[in-house]
Amino acid sequence: MTGSGAFYKCYISARGWAPDAQPFRIESSQSKTLDGKAGEWRGGFASPSKRGTRAYMWSNGDVSHGAEDTYSPTNSSTLVFNVQFLKVDTDKAFAIAQEHGGDKLLKQSPDTPILYVLEWNRLTNELLWHVIYGTDRDTAKLRVAVNASTGEFSRVEK
């Protein structure tokens, strides 16, 4: 499933846990497909009224949740965003990342896994899809940021 599809499945479950639940992150498992899809997605949601966070996972059509943790609105790793900013899906983000170096990388290393991470960037005040070519952010061969509201290329991340 694409990132937005899995996100909304998790979001519905999170709103059942807490009506004021807001997302702060969604990320895929490693994927080898070239269509913006992944077999598993994990989303993090925060509830100001419960002062808690909870992770939700979509896998093979089912949504499950993790344990509740504490939430602080000042924590930069749980910076929530408004769902209305999410207008561009991972298939489009992948296509844009391909235009900015991904196509060359996959020609050289076709088995490179791809990860997708969606989160709010406080510095640029925008919601970004990070298309990560590799097993994680730190060791990635390439990381491309795409604006999740407009679909525009943002930058190649170092």
Image (cartoon, rainbow, N blue to C red):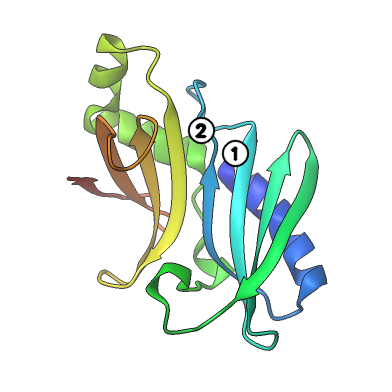
**Split into 4 quadrants, where in the image is the C terminus?**
top left
Q: Residue furthest left?
A: 158
Q: Nearer the viewer, residue 35 or 143?
A: 143
Q: Residues within 10 Å of mark 2 (few under 14, many from 20)?
A: many
Image height check: is 79 above or below 65?
below
Task: Please tell me which of labels 2 and 1 falls first in the chain.
Answer: 1
What residue sits 68% from the left and 88% below the top? 49
Which quarter of the figure has residue 1? top right
x and y percentages locating residue 124 in the rendered image: 26, 69
Q: What residue is shown with label 1? A: 2
Q: Amino acid at mark 2?
A: Gly
Q: Residue furthest bottom?
A: 49
Is residue 43 shown left or right of residue 150?
Answer: right
Q: Amino acid at mark 1?
A: Thr
x and y percentages locating residue 120 in the rendered image: 41, 66
What residue sits 76% from the left and 70% below the top? 15
Image height check: is 33 above or below 100?
above
Is residue 67 shown left or right of residue 85?
Answer: right
Mark number, residue 36: 2
| SS at circle 1 | loop
Is residue 150 shown left or right of residue 27?
Answer: left
What residue sits 69% from the left and 81% below the top? 20
x and y percentages locating residue 16 in the rendered image: 82, 69
Which quarter of the figure has residue 128? bottom left
The reply to whether dot 2 and dot 1 touch (C-beta < 8 Å) is yes
